[in-house]
Amino acid sequence: MDLPSLSLVLQAALSSNPAERKAAEQSLNQFQYTPQHLVRVLQIIVDNNRDLAVRQFASIHFKNFIAKNWAPLDPNEQQKISPSDKDVVRDNILVYVTQVPPLLRVQLGECLKTIINSDYPEHWPRLLNWVKHNLQDQQVYGALFVLRILARKYEFKSEEERTPVHHIVEEIFPHLLNIFSKLVQIDKPSLEVADLIKLICKIFWSSIYLEIPKQLLDPNVFNAWMMLFLNVLERPVPVEGQPVDPELRKSWGWWKVKKWTVHILNRLYTRFGDLKLRNPENRAFAQMFQKNYAGKILECHLNLLGSIRVGGYLPDRVTNLILQFLSSSISKNSMYTLLQPQLDVLLFEIVFPLMCFNDNDQKLWEEDPHEYVRKGYDIIEDLYSPRTASMDFVSELVRKRGKENLQKFIQFIVEIFKRYDAAPVEYKPYRQKDGALLAVGALCDKLKQTEPYKSELEHMLMQHVFPEFRSPVGHLRAKAAWVAGQYAHVNFSDQNTFCQALHSVVSGLRDPELPVRVDSVFALRSFVEACRDLNEIRPILPQLLDEIFKLMNEVENEDLVFTLETIVDKFGEEMAPYALGLCQSLAAAFWRCMNTAEADDEADDPGALAAVGCLRAISTILESVSRLPHLFVQVEPTLLPIMRRMLTTDGQEVFEEVLEIVSYMTFFSPTISLDMWSLWPLMIEALADWAIDFFPNILVPLDNYISRGTAHFLNCKEPNYQQSLWNMISSILSDKNLEDSDIEPAPKLIEVVFQNCRGQVDHWVEPYLTITLDRLRRAEKSRLKCLLVQVIANALYYNSTLTLSVLDKFCVTSEVFNLWFQLLQQVRKSGVRVNFKRDHDKKVCCLGLTSLLAIPGEQLAGEALGRVFRATLDLLVAYKDQVAEAAKEEEAEDDDGMDGFESDDDEDADGSDKEMGVDAEDGDEADSIRLQKLAAQAKAFRANDDDDDDDDDSDDDFSDDEELQSPIDEVDPFVFFVDTVKVLQASDPLRFQNLTQTLDFHYQALANGVAQHAEQRRAEIEKEKMEKACAASLPS
């Protein structure tokens, strides 16, 4: 398509006529892969004489095409863009990216990012020279724009992938420093200068984010950069040109420069200038930074904060970053010494006012209460909030320097309470009271464990918090509910006080102001958790649920769902009368949240988070009524549409939660309905297409289908579930691109088939063994080898003669059993078995090996029989010991109750204070060492997956399916072993005699012990059966 024709098609794509638009889009799709197409689209984008709307549409088409086709994810996919077209695009996009209007620059910048990430340095070695040349040739903005994208490519890269960064820094940073220096010296700089400095800051940030390149560690070079950053930090922001609108003002170029400068200095300080976090080789840099720069940065930061005190402007993000810096400085003696003279002014005249309710809060509360609630519960907002940073600063101050500061801060709060109480209604300092309550809530953990405050908490709550439930001011009613929730777990001397607070919180659910209702629901969760006598809540339970669901109709907030979950969890089966209504309401809320999330198209949208919460709450309800199967029949029609839709690609964000619901529905329902069976193909399809990471989660419902719907699984031909399962398992086990750990559920599913369909799937024994043996030869990790060997053990238990004949047919019998016995015999230095760790694994092996004992002599030679017999005895003893140890641990847990847990009261009992002159960083050093030990343990734990020889006794191979039920749960391996040996003895006495004569004294003693234990187990099993029968016959 030539240029004029392409231009007409792009114009038509903007038509108001749907038919014209569709025809234009089809034409674009038809010609987009033809040679020169991409080049012509770029020509239209950069042509200033064309309509901007057409150019914008072309830029979006260009961006999407490049994102999809420049570097296809599949390396085997045929290249859609010719090398010559790529060369033209690379050469021209650099020239035009800064010449087009900002609207188009955004799109071209995204294209450039895709191309650089794919091509630099291998396929675009000239790029750095272009940047260098243009930095020196007055095309500075374009060069910096491209360099920013280039630097960002390596921002999060590991050390071994950061080699190009060193080359970039070596070649470009001297020029960058020179430009930066000239820009800083300009008198009365324009806004364009701010844009250039901001780009330089962003480039520097990306280059030092994870590690400082060695070229910048040169003291002279580093000092030159630091002098410029400090100059920018100190220099007042120009007054002229500042926007009046607050939203525009915080995004204004010079404030952005200030923000990025603070960002960089904070990063240098917290990551590279902190002595306790640095490796020994970097300690010298940290010491140099502390000595030469940290104090100066602190001084500049305090000066910036000082402007707030006198009514000046400072963007929220800058305030937040500065307070983060100050919080990090509290524990460092040298910095705290510098901070101390100004601490009272900082604490009482800057930090505390930031904690108070303000004009912006009032405006939002009145004009958009939904947005007020969203901001209050949004984790992302916390990252930017001066209020959150102020709370963190106060918390850190009383935690690390409590001896000097806790008492005076609490005294300050008490004075506010007194002034508030003494003032007439029209003059009460409502906003200061709000800040004081926020401070009391933020210091909850500290006050609950520190005398004399600990003893006074109940009095404080009754006198200063609970009265505000009746405040005429909405934000104080909300804050009272929040603070009450923070202290709900306090041991009240008078239980009536707890009850009154609880009922006040419940009343808040009906408050006319939305934020009060939300904070009340949030607080209710803590009261439900802390409630010792549920009779306080039981009578009002329907009302509570009703109010929560009314609120869920108004607000998408996952904290509301958490409260609901807590109530369901606390009341258990008592929720049965409400289960259907709850599930219906949650399903309706889920669909609303999903619609909002799809409309907003943001991953971190509160609607998406609340949708996950709704599904989790449904699971909690299903779990609470698990012993009432008739309820599952009632809720199925409500939940089925969610399961059907969300088991497709539409549900990737909630797939795990949906699978949990499917698991409950297939396990606890009286029978699995045909509607529920219709979900099987969706899970199999998802697994084949994109959901391999969820295979362990999919295993659970598939197990339920096979174990609880065995007849339908075996007899249904349309669809053929047996064939469907085989197709999936064989495809996964034969896929050479999948890691061993990815496919572990596959052998577990084969086990489910063999154990649940005994005698009914003979025709599948050979295919499943064939694919298992093939994968066993390629398996690298012992964990997978064991699971594949267990498939063979299960096949032997299913039909030992048939299984042995298949192994003989493939001439692998000796090979398989040699590997099996080798895996069984591997032990750690401590004597603990390396493989088959779970008692279930041992039991499967016992049943498989025991089944071999009944095989006729011609199929299993006497020597092999003896080997199998001895291995089985060893396994039975190990199984017996493991079961006994587990029972003992369970008994100990029941006896201990909560004794094993330490309360938070032990933490920081001394306030973590040091006298001035004793290094307060020693405590942090100890914390750091503890953290390093924990990190090392975590690393070792992860390493177990990769190192089968690691000398570790932990059962790190345990997984969620440990709790799954299995038909062999009813089979006692000791009784099965003794009964099988008796059959051998009766059917072939001579063979049995030969076997016993080959046993040495040790194994004879083991055999006698196992026989005695088998009789003991037989008696216990009979007793359990009789007790169950008696219990069943008693009237309920």
Image (cartoon, rainbow, N blue to C red):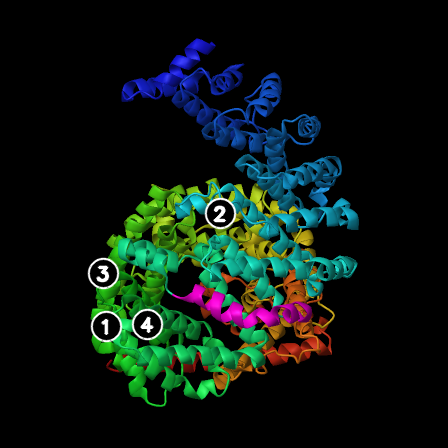
How far is mark 4 from mark 3, CA to CA?
Answer: 19 Å
Q: What type is the residue that disc 2 sits on?
A: Trp
Circles 1 and 2, Cβ within 8 Å, touching? The answer is no
Q: What type is the residue that disc 4 sits on?
A: Ala
Q: Earlier in the sequence, mark 1 or mark 2?
A: 1
Q: Earlier in the sequence, mark 2 or mark 3?
A: 3
Tag of residue 550: 3
Q: What type is the residue that disc 3 sits on?
A: Lys
How far is mark 1 from mark 4, CA to CA?
Answer: 10 Å
Front position among marks 1 and 3: 1
Q: Write down the region rendered in magenta.
A: 332-356
Front position among marks 4 and 2: 4
Question: Percent position (x, y) of residue 152?
Answer: 61, 40
Determine whether 608 is above or below 1020 in the image.
Answer: above
Circle 2 SS class: helix
Tag of residue 481: 4
